Amino acid sequence: MRRRANRYEKIMGMPAYIVGDVTVTDPERYQDYSAHTESTLTPFGGRFIVRGGPSERLEGHWEPGRLVLIEFPSSQAARDWYASERYQEILPIRQEASTGSLVLVEGYGN
């Protein structure tokens, strides 16, 4: 079966990443958010690279919480995902169940 490319897969450019440093304050409620997040990424070509695995500080003083790294085909795709109706519907759950920060960073192109 031939898969149809979404519009973000057709955009040439540098990949972009959303980096999240999250401290989960209500694990049960956060599971409600996590269960729906991945399906919101697909229409924008997004995919999890890191999703809360163990981390080890090698240098400095940063003590991250739950680290998340999401790759998108472009910074516009990442912005569109964050602003999308489907993600905005579940965003309040994350904000109720955790604290933290998200940043958008452009990838390195060759």
Image (tube, helix red, strand yellow):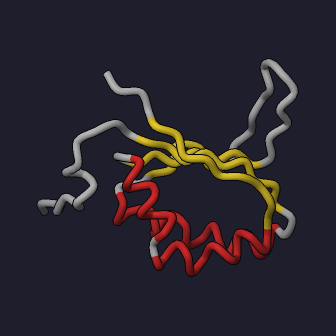
Total numbered labels placed on residues in the image: 0
Q: Kindly indicate the quadrant of the structure image that contains residue 69.
A: top right
Side of 49 relative to 58 (left or right): left
Q: Nearer the viewer, residue 82 or 63?
A: 82
Residue in view at x 83 percent, y 21 percent: 60
Side of 1 relative to 80 (left or right): left
Q: How far from the left and from the top, in percent, is residue 4?
A: 16, 62
Residue in view at x 24 percent, y 51 percent: 9
Q: How far from the left and from the top, in percent, is residue 89?
A: 56, 81
Q: Residue furthest left?
A: 2
Residue in view at x 74 percent, y 70 percent: 95
Q: Quadrant of the N terminus?
A: bottom left
Above or below for 94 versus 5: below
Q: Kindly indicate the quadrant of the structure image that contains residue 58.
A: top right
Q: How far from the left and from the top, in percent, is residue 17?
A: 50, 43
Q: Kindly indicate the quadrant of the structure image that contains residue 90.
A: bottom right
Above or below for 107 versus 82: above
Q: How far from the left and from the top, in percent, is residue 26?
A: 84, 70
Q: Quadrant of the C terminus?
A: top left
Q: Nearer the viewer, residue 106 or 56?
A: 106
Q: Residue furthest top?
A: 59
Above or below for 92 versus 20: below
